[in-house]
């Protein structure tokens, strides 16, 4: 078991003929093959106008529709450049892809507002037809990985181990940090979801936490937030009411100067809300163990699981 | 990206959003000429407004009223070149290099109106208040009921009922004598909302939105204008990109932006080079945790080349306050050997005069570590981010 991705994943890459798209498709394929019988399938990719070609053994299709029809693709990883990314996501959703993972950084925010509208409408139709909702992870995210089954995205696969810690984070590299620390301490991960740092995205903390709470193979959770917005506060509130699993948290940006943009369009402190201290307080209030530094996520979780704190 | 008030007003005028007549001036003589031209169009009163990228200009002495073009000239010469200090500029203030000379339109009523990209509703939200012209954040904090918060459904776009809600809340256009203001507000909001989407804005703020004139002659007008654009979308708006004023930005940040680096200068002593915004912030946090202070925030990004890393390293070393550098990389897209190559080439070019602690992990880590070890540079390697932070704090506090 795992959440969203695993053995049954049939992955394609949108933008596979680009340098970065190809490099990471190769990484995902190598990871899936190493997983053996449990590994998901990395099928190939889509680049409009390049259909029928192959790149490094990957078949290329002209459209997502084609990949769905011919190969039964159910998951897509998007590496299309920023101004085309929203369009690529929409095509994947329209073609019936169940999970779209958008890695692209720098997508205009209003483009994502349109994508959200489209998804809402689609998912209402799907609900009426008794189908499960489509999901988007990202954009501006590292992707999602179920260790031992499939890696979708740009994360270094070798730091992961199959296990029972679910990790959700707004920051890519901090996710790796949490993974590395848990692996080093002999704990593995069920699934790791990088939701991305953009203000308008597909999957938020609560969506991910809900999946982890339901997943029998996830026994504990690490949640990593950032300054800006109120998603972490809302997630803490949700955890307080709904989560029975132990949760360790961290918020990056405690020392960030107020009012300054810190890379992610979302990381803006405004009107006294969204500060690191405020978010950490909300986490503590909800019973989440807050790691004192980003280097102690693993040790804090271990101590918590062993009943030492 | 931020722009000046006068640029925002010029864009508004083109978009059909009502603003007072005005002309930008870079010298006192130009300011006088601008006022004379406005006088020729019927202006009887003039406002001289300092143009810097910060709010609170009036309180800081950057906004003055004048009755004649001569008076405008005198005021202009005193404001141009001044270091204008407001609550948003920092203690040293910001040098005034341009003025907006505007027709004076004394307001009968000052209100507040803004449109923001709202992460909570995942769309555009309208904020409005009948009490404009004052500290809106204070008002929001003390009397939240005095602010209308209204998300606009992106699928429908602007619709007249939104306008009627705002008008009722603001208390304008509710009587027979000023009913025409609702129509004006509708045109104002329709065009402003369209502008927001057309130009990929992240914030449009009008404070104050004013009613000027009496009774049937009364009209709505934006007396101030603040616009921020979504940086991600600048690539598709050449007209907006041209409005960038580099004088308003820190020189090291301007240099960094040439290389597409995410850099913010801070006042500490430990230079940081990190990949990923979250890890970059966390690195600053952990440096502080161990008693040091970061000299900058720097996210080299995912797809950085060795050249970009080299330039980033050079920008960090240029800061005279930097007493040590901490490179903290967890490679995903970013390959550790690329970082090593960039660091080595930068130190060859500019030398390495301060302690350097490097922590590498992730994609191609072995290759990166080997390159650094063979480089002959005096580099302290760290096994984890905590180890690295402690080492650099120790090195710099010697």
Image (cartoon, coloured by chain):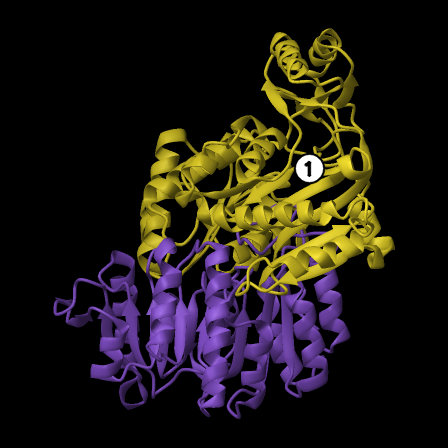
| Residue closer to the observer: B396 or B10 | B10
The image position of residue B328, as x and y in percent, is 48, 53
Label 1, residues with CA under 10 Å away: few <14, some 14-19, many ≥20:
many
**Left or right position of A302 against B359:** right
Corner quadrant of residue A1: bottom left
Q: The chain coloured yellow carries which letter? A: B
Q: Is residue B376 visible?
A: no
Outermost residue, right side: B142
The answer for which chain carries disc 1 is: B
Tell me: A281 left or right of A43.
right
Give me the residue at 50% from left, 90% from top.
A217
Q: Number of labelled discs?
A: 1
Question: What is chain A's hue in the picture?
Answer: purple
- Residue B152 shown left or right of residue A21 in the figure: right
Q: Provide the secondary structure element on which disc 1 rests.
A: strand
**To which residue does mark 1 refer?**
B222
- Above or below: residue B92 compared with residue A240: above
Relative to B394, say whether A46 is above or below.
below
- For the residue pair A249 and B62, the one nearer the viewer reads as B62
Q: Quadrant of the N terminus of chain B?
A: top right
* Residue drawn at x 74%, y 62% as measured from the top left: A278
- Picture coordinates of residue B119 (x, y %)? 60, 61
- In the picture shown, does residue A295 fall above or below A28? above
Residue B117 horizontal/vertical position (percent): 59, 55
Q: Residue at x 71, y 57 (%)?
A: B164
The answer to whether residue B271 shows anywhere in this view is yes
Q: Could you say which is closer to the camera, residue B359 or residue B173?
A: B173
Q: Quadrant location of the C terminus of chain B? A: top right
Residue A98 locus on image (x, y percent)? 39, 81
């Amino acid at each position: 078991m795992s959440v969203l991705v695993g053995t049954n994943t049939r992955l394609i890459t949108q933008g596979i003929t680009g340098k970065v798209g190809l490099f990471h498709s190769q990484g995902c394929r190598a990871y899936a093959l190493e997983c053996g019988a449990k590994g998901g399938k990395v099928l190939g990719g889509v680049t409009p106008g390049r259909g029928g070609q192959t790149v490094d053994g990957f078949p290329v299709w002209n459209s997502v529709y084609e990949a769905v029809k011919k190969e039964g693709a159910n998951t897509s990883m998007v590496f299309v450049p920023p101004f085309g990314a929203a369009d690529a996501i929409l095509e994947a959703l329209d073609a019936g892809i169940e999970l779209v993972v958008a890695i692209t950084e720098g997508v205009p925010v209003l483009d994502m507002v349109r994508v959200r509208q489209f998804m809402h409408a689609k998912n209402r139709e799907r609900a009426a037809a008794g189908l499960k909702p489509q999901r988007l992870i990202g954009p501006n995210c590292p992707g999602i990985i179920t260790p031992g089954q499939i890696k979708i995205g740009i994360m270094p696969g070798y730091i992961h181990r199959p296990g029972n810690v679910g990790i959700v984070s707004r920051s890519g590299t901090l996710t790796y940090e949490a993974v590395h620390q848990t692996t080093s301490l002999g704990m593995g991960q069920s699934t790791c979801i990088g939701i991305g740092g953009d203000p308008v995205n597909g999957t938020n903390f609560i969506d991910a936490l809900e999946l982890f709470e339901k997943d029998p193979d996830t026994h504990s959770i690490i949640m990593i937030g950032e300054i800006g917005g109120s998603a972490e506060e809302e997630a803490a509130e949700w955890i307080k009411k709904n989560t029975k699993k132990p949760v360790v948290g961290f918020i990056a940006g405690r020392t960030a100067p107020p009012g300054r943009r810190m890379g992610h369009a979302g990381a803006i402190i405004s009107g006294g809300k969204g500060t690191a201290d405020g978010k950490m307080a909300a986490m503590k209030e909800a019973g989440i163990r807050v790691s004192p530094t980003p280097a102690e996520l693993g040790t804090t979780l271990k101590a918590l699981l062993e009943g030492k704190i | 990206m931020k722009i000046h008030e006068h640029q925002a007003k010029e864009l508004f005028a083109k978009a059909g959003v009502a603003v007072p007549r005005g002309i930008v001036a870079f010298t006192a003589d130009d300011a006088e000429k601008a006022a004379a031209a406005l006088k020729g169009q019927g202006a009887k009163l003039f406002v001289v407004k300092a143009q810097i990228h910060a709010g609170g200009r009036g309180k800081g002495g950057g906004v003055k009223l004048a009755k004649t073009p001569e008076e405008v000239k005198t005021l202009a010469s005193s404001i141009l070149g001044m270091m204008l200090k407001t609550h948003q500029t920092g203690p040293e203030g910001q040098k005034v290099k341009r003025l907006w000379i505007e027709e004076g339109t004394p307001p009968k009523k000052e209100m507040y109106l803004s449109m923001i990209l709202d992460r909570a509703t995942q769309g555009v939200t309208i904020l409005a208040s009948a009490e404009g012209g004052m500290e809106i954040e204070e008002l929001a904090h003390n009397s939240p009921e005095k602010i209308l918060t209204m998300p606009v459904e992106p699928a429908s776009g602007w619709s007249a009922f939104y306008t009627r809600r705002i008008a009722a809340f603001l208390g304008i256009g509710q009587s027979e004598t000023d009913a025409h203001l609702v129509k004006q507000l509708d045109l104002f909001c329709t065009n402003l909302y369209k502008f927001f989407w057309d130009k990929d804005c992240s914030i449009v703020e009008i404070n104050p939105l004013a009613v000027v004139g009496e009774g049937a002659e009364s009209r709505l007008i934006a007396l101030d204008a603040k616009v921020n654009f979504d940086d991600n979308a600048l690539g598709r708006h050449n007209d907006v990109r041209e409005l960038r004023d580099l004088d308003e930005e820190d020189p090291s940040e301007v240099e960094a932006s040439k290389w597409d680096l995410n850099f913010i200068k801070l006042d500490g002593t430990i230079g940081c080079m990190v990949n990923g915004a979250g890890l970059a912030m966390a690195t600053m946090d952990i440096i502080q945790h161990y008693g040091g202070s970061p000299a900058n925030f720097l996210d080299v990004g995912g797809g950085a080349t060795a050249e970009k890393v080299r330039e980033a390293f050079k920008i960090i070393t240029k800061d005279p306050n930097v007493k040590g550098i901490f490179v903290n990389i967890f490679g995903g897209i970013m390959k550790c050997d690329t970082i090593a190559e960039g660091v080595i080439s930068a130190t060859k070019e500019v030398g390495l005069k301060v302690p350097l602690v490097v922590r590498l992990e992730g994609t191609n880590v072995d290759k990166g570590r080997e390159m650094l070890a063979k480089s002959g540079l005096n580099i302290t390697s760290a096994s984890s981010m905590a180890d690295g932070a402690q080492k650099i704090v120790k090195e710099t506090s010697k």
